[in-house]
Image (cartoon, rainbow, N blue to C red):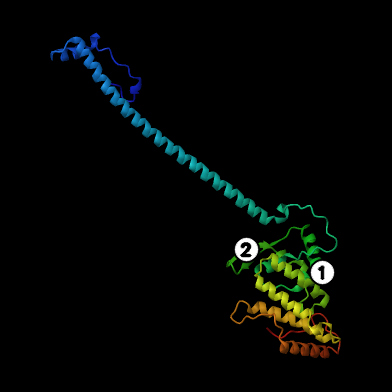
C-alpha cells in the first residue's frame, strides 16, 4: 500500500521473501501453501492493489487538471474582460476628449489654403442648426461669417466663461461655453425681414449646406430649397417696385419663423407654395410702413412684422 498523497506509479513492490514479511507468509503457508507460493500470492495481491491505486490516482489527477483548466480559463476570461473594459473606457475617454477639443484632434488635410471667405458660421448658429431650430439667415451671410471669424479669433486669446443651458430634448442642464450661446458675433445680427437681396442670396445656399451637415431630414431640406427658389424666381424679384422686392424678403422672414414655431404642433404646414394673399398683404404693409416713414425706403429694423 502507498501512503496518502504518494504517487502509486512511483511505488516499489516490497520483497515479500524478506524477513519483515515472514508473518504474512506464515499466515498463507498455514493454508497448505508453500513459502514460495505465499511470496508469489503476496506479490500478486500487491500488484492488484497498486493497479487500483493507479486508476484512482489517475482519475483524481484528471479531475484536478480539469479544475485547474477551468480556473485558469476563468482567470483568463476575467483578464480579457478587464482588458476590454479598460480599452472601452480608454476609447470613451478619448472620444469625449475629441468631442471636447475637436480643433485639437481634427485630422490635418493636404488641402491648399482657401482664397477668399471660408463659410464657417458661428457656434451659435451651428448649435441651433444641430437642434433643428430657427436660425437667422444673417449668420450665414458674408457679414455673419466674418463676425463669427472675428469672434473666434478674439475668444481664442481669452478664457471663455461657461454657462448652464437647459437641453429640452434631454431635459437636463449642460455646461457650455458662453460664446456658444451668446457669441459676440451676434452683436451685429440682422433679422431676416431686414436682409438685403444680396445678403439673402449669400446666406440661403450656405444654410442649405449646414442643414445637410446637421442631418436635417431630406424632406425639410427639399422644402426650403423649393421655398427659396420660388422667392428668387418670383416676378416681383426683378420688379421696378422696390416694395414688391422687399415684400418677398419680409414674407420669407416672417413665414420661415412662423413655420419653425408651428412645426412641433398639429397646425404645421409646408412653405413650398407661396400664399398669394399673404404675399399681397405683406406688400401692402411694407408700402404702408414706408409711407409712415415719409416715403423713404425701409431701413433695417424699421419693418414690424405681424405678431406670430
Which residue is found at the position 61% from the left and 67% from the top? 167
Q: Where is residue 258 in the image (x, y as percent from the top left)?
A: 68, 80
Residue 167 against residue 113 in the figure, above or below: below
Marks 2 and 1 close (CB-CB < 8 Å): no
Q: Is residue 8 visible?
A: yes
At numbered mark 2, what does the secondary structure look like: helix, strand or loop?
A: strand
Mark 2 vs 1, N-terminal side: 1
Q: In which quarter of the image is residue 201?
A: bottom right
Disc on res. 245: none
- Taking depth in this image into account, of 202 and 4 the one nearest to the observer is 202
Q: Identify the image quadrant of residue 189.
A: bottom right
In the image, 85 versus 176, the foreground residue is 85
Expressed as whole percent of the image width and height from the top left, the position of residue 64 reads: 38, 33
Disc 1 secondary structure class? helix
Q: Classify residue 48 by image quadrant.
A: top left
For the residues carrying marks 2 and 1, which lies nearer the camera in this image? Answer: 1
What is the total number of numbered labels drawn onto the structure image? Answer: 2
Seen in the picture, residue 12 relative to 103 is either above or below; the reply is above
Q: Residues within 10 Å of mark 1 (few under 14, many from 20)?
A: many
Relative placement, left or right, of 1 versus 213 is left
Quadrant of the snapshot with the C terminus: bottom right
Q: How crowded is mark 2: few (under 14 residues within 10 Å), some or many (20 or more)?
A: few
Where does residue 237 sit, x and y in percent of width and height? 81, 82
- Residue 181 seen: no
- Residue 186: give x, y in percent of width and height: 76, 70
Residue sitting at 63 percent across and 77 percent down? 263
Q: Nearer the viewer, residue 232 or 169?
A: 232
Indicate the quadrant containing the N terminus: top left, top right, bottom left or bottom right.
Answer: top left
**Residue that label 2 marks:** 174
- Marks 2 and 1, Cα distance to the nearest angstrom? 31 Å
The circle drawn on residue 142 is: 1
Amino acid at each position: 500500500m502507498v501512503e496518502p498523497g504518494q504517487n502509486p506509479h512511483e511505488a516499489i513492490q516490497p520483497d515479500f521473501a524478506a524477513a519483515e514479511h515472514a508473518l504474512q507468509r506464515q499466515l498463507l503457508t498455514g493454508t497448505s501453501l508453500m513459502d514460495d507460493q505465499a511470496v508469489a500470492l503476496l506479490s500478486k495481491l500487491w500488484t492488484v492493489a497498486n493497479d487500483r491505486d493507479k486508476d484512482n490516482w489517475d482519475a483524481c489527477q484528471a479531475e484536478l487538471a480539469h479544475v485547474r483548466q477551468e480556473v485558469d480559463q476563468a482567470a483568463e476570461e476575467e483578464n480579457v474582460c478587464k482588458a476590454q473594459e479598460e480599452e472601452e473606457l480608454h476609447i470613451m475617454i478619448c472620444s469625449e476628449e475629441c468631442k471636447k477639443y475637436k480643433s485639437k484632434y481634427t485630422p490635418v488635410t493636404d488641402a491648399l489654403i482657401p482664397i477668399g471667405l471660408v463659410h464657417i458660421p458661428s457656434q451659435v448658429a451651428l448649435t441651433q442648426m444641430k437642434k433643428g431650430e430657427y436660425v437667422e439667415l444673417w449668420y450665414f451671410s458674408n457679414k455673419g461669417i466674418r463676425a463669427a471669424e472675428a469672434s473666434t479669433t478674439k475668444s481664442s486669446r481669452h478664457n471663455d466663461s461657461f454657462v448652464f443651458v437647459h437641453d429640452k430634448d434631454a431635459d437636463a442642464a449642460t455646461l457650455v461655453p458662453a460664446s456658444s450661446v451668446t457669441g459676440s458675433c451676434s452683436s451685429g445680427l440682422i433679422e431676416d425681414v431686414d436682409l438685403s437681396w444680396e445678403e439673402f442670396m449669400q446666406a440661403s445656399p450656405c444654410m442649405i449646406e449646414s442643414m445637410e451637415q446637421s442631418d436635417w431630414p431630406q424632406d425639410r431640406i427639399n422644402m426650403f430649397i423649393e421655398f427659396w427658389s420660388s422667392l428668387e424666381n418670383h416676378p416681383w424679384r426683378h420688379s421696378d417696385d422696390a416694395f414688391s422686392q422687399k415684400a418677398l424678403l419680409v414674407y420669407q422672414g416672417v413665414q420661415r419663423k412662423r413655420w419653425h414655431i408651428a412645426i412641433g404642433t398639429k397646425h404645421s404646414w409646408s412653405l413650398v407654395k407661396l400664399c398669394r394673399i399673404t404675399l399681397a398683404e405683406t406688400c401692402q404693409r411694407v408700402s404702408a410702413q414706408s409711407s409712415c416713414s415719409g416715403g423713404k425706403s425701409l431701413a433695417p429694423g424699421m419693418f414690424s412684422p405681424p405678431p406670430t
